Amino acid sequence: MSYVRHVLQQDEKIRYETTIHWIAYLPGFALLVLAGGVWLWSLKVNSMREFLAILVMLLLVLAAVALFSAWFRRWTTEIAVTNKRIIYKRGFIQRKTIEMNMDKVESVDVDQSIFGRLLGYGDITVRGTGAGFEPLKNIDSPIEFRNHVTAE
């Protein structure tokens, strides 16, 4: 059972759920492409074939670590808007949660780059009375998130 569903209060309903955007996988995919390029180059070069094979293996290991890390971060991050509050949870064993009641929300700031607008991700900062959330980085569909927070 997800954390958000576990902590729902009586008469509380989820309006919107999101997580980290798939762009988090990009560094791992870039390392895979680089490993493929080095492997293709090693087929043409005879003098450094052993060195290039080791480099390809290193790049593949780094790509696997980066992809697993991105997947794990996405899997362990939950962001939800309910009719009563905003819930943000990250982590697996060491869990960090931030919750803010909807009546305490003053504003929701969305920061999107050009690529963020094209691909549908961005950073969100929720500001409340007295405190706010840390910026939530690379969140999927940040405008839709903001719309569900600001909807009455």
Image (spheres, helix red, strand yellow):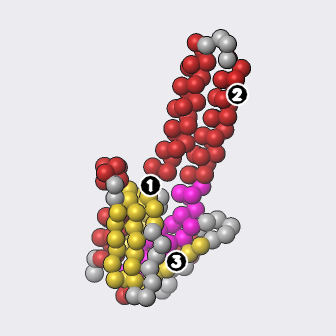
Q: Is residue 85 covered in magenta? A: yes
Categorize mark 2 by other alpha carbons within 10 Å: few (<14), some (14-19), many (20+). Answer: few
Residue type at numbered disc 3: Ile
Give the distance between the C-alpha atoms of the residues marked 2 and 1, in whole angstroms.
32 Å
Mark before the other along the chain sequence, 3 or 2: 2
Q: Which residue is mark 1?
A: 21
Residue 66 image position (x, y, % from top left): 59, 46
Instruction: Write down the quadrant of residue 62 in the picture.
Output: top right
Residue drawn 52% across the image and 44% down it: 27
Q: Are marks 3 and 2 in contact (CB under 8 Å)?
A: no
Q: Are marks 2 and 1 in contact (CB under 8 Å)?
A: no
Q: Is residue 148 covered in magenta? A: no
Residue drawn 48% across the image and 86% down it: 10
Residue type at numbered disc 1: His
Q: Nearer the viewer, residue 140 or 34?
A: 34
Q: Which residue is mark 2?
A: 54
Compared with 103, 45 (above or below) is: above
